[in-house]
Amino acid sequence: MRFSRHKTTLIRLTAVLLFTIGCEESVEELDYQEKLVVFANLEAGLPLMDTVYVSYTYEINEAHESEGKWVSDADVWITGAGDTLEFLPVEGRPGRYTTSSFELIESGEEYTLNVEHDDESVSASTTVPDSFTVTSVTSDLYECDGEPVFVDTIDLHLEENSLPVILEAMMSGDYSSLAMDTVIYREGPCHTTSFASVPLFLIDWEAEEEPGMMRVISFALEDTTTNAIVDTSFTANAFKGSMWVDEDGNYYRPNPAVVNLSQDVIDFSWLLFNYYGPHLIAMQTTDHAFSDYFFGDPFRQNQWILPDSNVDGGYGLFSSVATRYFVVYIAPDTEP
């Protein structure tokens, strides 16, 4: 079964802006109530290796992540798929909890996170998304200076680059063992001006059940300042944010690049790449708790609007994803 998602980022942005302009500020006064905040995420097919974060809420004038708000003596456990797994505090890292279990997270199963501290308790549940397929596709819908531009497929090498193979290469720092296609990062009015620019390549995905949303993570494996794609133009700063500068005056941007999307064909454009060289791409289908959390105020226009949390009795997010990985090499355009 295939689910169509043709809402573009432009439509969503326009709707949010119109809604924001048409609303009046609320004058309702709310009393601050300190509550527990928990964050954790599960990934289908992998052990429960993600950290569970536990803290108390912050007042608006308090420094974020102040040491006094982290909770390191809570009882934390996750139940699901017939198991109950206890999480223990991480020594030297306040508010962080991990487990030594190697039980794999099962697709389609519901898991519940429980946290108790003093007289307070919170819980949250997530249903792990099923696996999905990804395919590189072509497109002839783009133009440059009035001329059609054909976007060709790339080889994702899904069979050659299993996750253990990728992780081994990352640990060694030798990426020559990974199979990857090379795509050219072209600059100019047609390629690096907006989210509608001609993409480097396109990926189609299909899932049996509709996920909450798609999440794309583009992680540069060689994120040195030497490999940084230096672009300080107005459009680059507007869409990617201003470049950072190190103590030696070298320009660079954050790594990885992360976007949340909802369309069925995802264009991998200049916005997802800030470095030349090999990139690990993670495409994730999320549960609906994840999408509900980020749809509350996706552009963070209003700091007074709380995200739609699935944590009963507190705040935060307990979510889950299914992921497909592939590797691609981003090369500079050497043509004059």
Image: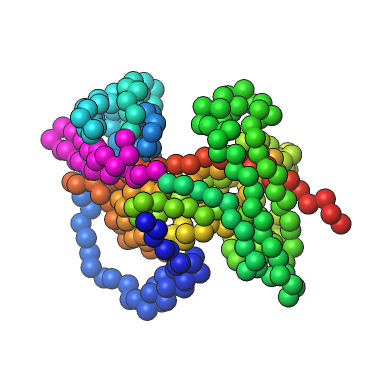
Extreme residue in the right direction:
336
Residue at 39% x, 60% y is 3
- Residue 48 percent across, percent down from the top left: 35, 30
Whether residue 328 is visible:
yes
Looking at the rendering, the stretch of residues picked out in magenta corresponds to 106-131
Instruction: Identify the main secondary structure in magenta.
Output: strand
Residue in the foreground of this view, choosing between 91 and 204: 204
- Residue 86 percent across, percent down from the top left: 25, 25
Residue in the foreground of this view, choosing between 192 and 122: 192
| The N terminus, quarter of image | bottom left
- Residue 28 percent across, percent down from the top left: 23, 68
Q: Based on the displayed image, in which of its 4 quarters is residue 82 positioned?
A: top left
Residue at 73% x, 56% y is 186
- Does residue 220 appear to the left or right of 189 in the view shown? left
The answer to whether residue 128 is magenta is yes
The answer to whether residue 127 is magenta is yes
- Residue 44 percent across, percent down from the top left: 37, 37
- Does residue 180 appear to the left or right of 211 in the view shown? right
Residue at 23% x, 34% y is 80
The answer to whether 91 is drawn above or below residue 211 in the figure is above
Residue at 69% x, 63% y is 150
